[in-house]
Amino acid sequence: MAAYTQVQLNSGSLGEVLNAGTTYTFTFATPAFTSQSVYGGNAYFSMDSSTFTNAGLQGSSTNAIVGALKSGLIPLSNTVDQITGVGANTTFTFDVDGDAQGSEAQIDLTSTAGTITRANVVRGGQNFISGDGITISQNDLQAAGFSNADASQQLDLFPNHIEGEYISSNLAGTIGGFTGDVSQSLFVSQSYFSGSVNEPSIWTYSFSIRQDVGSGAGTFTFNPTTTVPASSYYLKSTGHMTLNITS
């Protein structure tokens, strides 16, 4: 898997992918260092996916954004043509929902010479998520007046077409396997909920660990409920500890 040095952890290092249903062992060590005999106290470790406190995670391709569609043009993801009659050169308005989530938006579709050539968001709606799509069915196209349209119209929802908040990766899972100086009693977690069903259950784990002569080593295990994408969370620490993650 991966190893992280004290320097990487002190500056904050982007984490690797953690696959759902896989148990990972986090192994901490405190190597000998100059003046260790007079070094004492607690160091702190955190595993943090919060986009609210980590600006570097905002806009990452691994973090989805949820909100209203931005007003204006939105790219077409396929070509719909063979339109005949009055609908061959006109504009119709459609009420649209996201394929997975999102609702109450309106999009104008414009045809030119029998082909749909433009989509324009006129009402943003709510709760759309990047990585999803919008499908305006062939039946709805034809019923609106795009006679003989030969396919459904697809639109992919990229982050730059949604006005909203980035979602923190969900760090919910099973924590266990505590050994050495890594104590379950010192673990804390933080969660965030803004009313969206997409908000994570947990976005931060942290704990303190004693660092002194003969201290500063131990393990815990983590089995994530859902896959945590690479580079969607930070591994951070104070002190002089190192970390190895294995599965």
Image (cartoon, grey):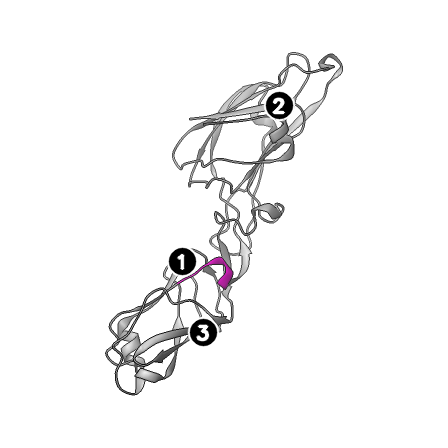
Image quarter where the N terminus lies is top left
The kind of residue on which mark 3 rests is Asn
Q: CA distance from mark 1 to mark 2?
A: 40 Å
Which residue is tagged 3? 120
In the image, what residue occupies the spot 54% across and 40% down? 233
The kind of residue on which mark 2 rests is Met
**Which quarter of the picture shows residue 107?**
bottom left
**Which quarter of the picture shows residue 119?**
bottom left
The magenta span reads 156-161
* Element class at badge 1: loop
Q: Nearer the viewer, residue 11 or 166?
A: 11
* Element class at badge 3: strand
Which residue is tagged 1? 132
Residue sticking out furthest to the right: 38
Label 1 vs 3, first from the N-terminus: 3
Mark drawn on residue 241: 2
The kind of residue on which mark 1 rests is Asp
